[in-house]
Image: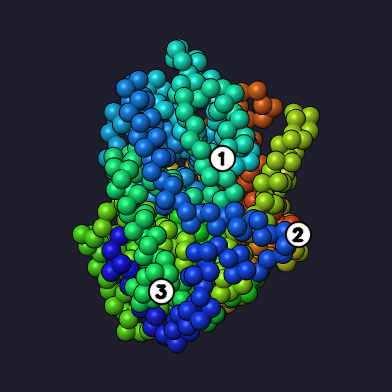
Amino acid sequence: MPIRAQSIVAGCLQTAFHRGLEYFLENRVLERLWTKDTTLWPEEEFEQSHILSNLGWLDLPATLEPLLKGIRQEESAATADGLDCRALIAFESANLAARALLPFVQSGNDHQIVILDNTCPTTIYRAEKQLNLERTLFIFASKAGYRLEDHALFLYFREKLQAAGVPHPLQHFVAQTEPGSYLASLSRGYKFRAVFADPPGILATFTSLRHLGALLVSRLANEPEGIVAAAKEMHHACSPGTIPAENPALQLAAFLSGAAVAKRQYVAFLATPSLVPYTYCLSQLIGGSLAKEGPGLIPIDGEVPRDTHALEEKAVFAVLTRAGDTNPELSDMMSRFRVSGVPFVHVQIVEPLDLLPLTFCWEVATVMACARLGFDPFDESEARLPRAIAMEYLNKYSPANDTLSRRPRLDDRGLQLYAEGKTRREISTLNLEESLGSFLQLLQPESFLAVLVFLPQTLRVLAAFQAMRTKLAEKLTIPVLLAYGPHSLHHYSHLHRKGLSHGQFLVITAEPAIDLAIPGAAYTFGQLHRALALGEFEGLVESDRFVVRIQLTGEIPVALENLGHVVDQALARKQ
């Protein structure tokens, strides 16, 4: 990726940007990073091995080639066996990599790819109907540990293959995981056709190079040698051997850390349509590492509302464009930013391969920024509460012990409102409009609002919540984050951190229109989906956040329309 593809306009943060550069140079941060000096970050003695292990991510560009050649070989063998369709089942970061590359994939009926990162039974059913099971290779990607969703979906699709009379159903499964993980044991026990080993001790977020590389080889037919060369080129460009003015990671680290030191709270991603999915990859990286207590940065991703005026005093911007795409709106916005002094970084993508070295550059910059701000970039200690709650409910569930039922505070027009803890004590329960209006009254100028949606991502649902996000952002003049569950349990887990207590949360749930059994389990996919949503909501309650859950009942289109009316009236009360 050419270095000229990234340009930084520090604007009103010019002094903070240069102080950042001075800090990194005076403290030899690049040199120390490349020698894996764990003292760059605050640590207890027991954390040294954890940090050192994760710093093995720096070596990934040099270790890509065997993986990519192995995947190329397995792709050819699977296609020769008649398996020309792909189903990627992933819940960590491989799904984000796949969604980032999907806009560039020409997927016809003969070479279909389906990404399944959701346990909603409606979504699973639709994915199944898209696939020709006899011709599908199921790829499971999970870094380490045990993830119930992987096991449940494996059992489900194995049973479907058997029911369809497929002669050798286990030859339809491959896995990419760490040695010693539950998925590794599962794949060995059931004799999957192939298992690709991920390096142990590195967070899934920092193994994105392997996920992107694997997908570039398998779905976009890039040659392994070209992918490795691009990764190594960026590795060298970010190393201490490159002069500071031409080192993209050093420049970006100074920009990000300078923004945080200057008390900018957010980094907002603006992108042309084909690059919007890639903003989730960078958002997970920034959120997991830099969204911490004190001077940190909270990412705002996806289709960010284009009226950015309310953000311009609180955020820095990352603008992603694709060469050849005409986007006058983003061009005009960057021109206005330059004139008004709004700080931003602009990155231009020429081809899909550029996403791989760009990701490595942002990883290096993020880790360096953490060194300056005093954060451990690999700390996920506060990310486990929602999942722990969900798993406890499922472990105790039985028909005689329904751990998943709750009684609403209000029930009106197909909408049920739930509020607990301090939220219950602070908001009105007179009616839905008053409840939501009093909830919005709790927002402060420094607050953000996160809308977490646990519904099937149909075009109708996506359009409804994007419109709601835009309306909320314009009327409330605060950042509004929008995330879809249950994969939000992982990608947005930074929002649960105690240091981000100025956030408020609106959780939207619904019972799926259909349900599917999980072979051998006492609960269904619908109940698993509900448990994950409850874990998110009740984890926020336990973390002492202001959070409301609204359950949509009846026909979803009607409930969505009613929800829109309630939000409109609540905003009118807020004004």
Instruction: Answer few, some or many: residues within 10 Å of disc 3's Cα (few below 14, many 20 plus, some between 14 and 19).
Output: many
For disc 2, the marked residue is 421
Q: Earlier in the sequence, mark 2 or mark 1?
A: 1
Please determine whether, in this image, residue 153 is positioned above or below residue 354. above
Does residue 19 appear anywhere in the picture? Answer: yes
For disc 3, the marked residue is 251
Image quarter in which the C terminus is found: bottom right
Q: Residue furthest right?
A: 400
Q: CA distance from mark 2 to mark 3?
A: 44 Å
Q: Residue at x 25, y 64 (%)?
A: 327
Instruction: Residue 21: give x, y in percent of width and height.
Output: 45, 80
Instruction: Residue 356: give x, y in percent of width and height.
Output: 37, 53
Q: Residue at x 27, y 33 (%)?
A: 108
Determine the image quadrant of residue 274: bottom left
Please determine whether, in this image, residue 21 is positioned above or below residue 112. below
Q: Residue 200 bears which disc, if any? A: none
Does residue 491 appear anywhere in the picture? Answer: no
Circles 3, 1 touching at the beta carbon (< 8 Å) = no
Instruction: Residue 364: give x, y in percent of width and height.
Output: 47, 63
Instruction: Residue 494: give x, y in percent of width and height.
Output: 60, 60
For disc 1, the marked residue is 178
Tag 3, which secondary structure? helix
Q: Earlier in the sequence, mark 2 or mark 3?
A: 3
Q: CA distance from mark 2 to mark 1?
A: 39 Å
Q: CA distance from mark 3 to mark 1?
A: 33 Å
Circles 2, 1 touching at the beta carbon (< 8 Å) = no
Q: Residue at x 27, y 74 (%)?
A: 332
User: Mark 3: which amino acid?
Assistant: Gln
Q: Residue at x 68, y 66 (%)?
A: 43
Q: How many numbered dots are placed on residues in this image? A: 3
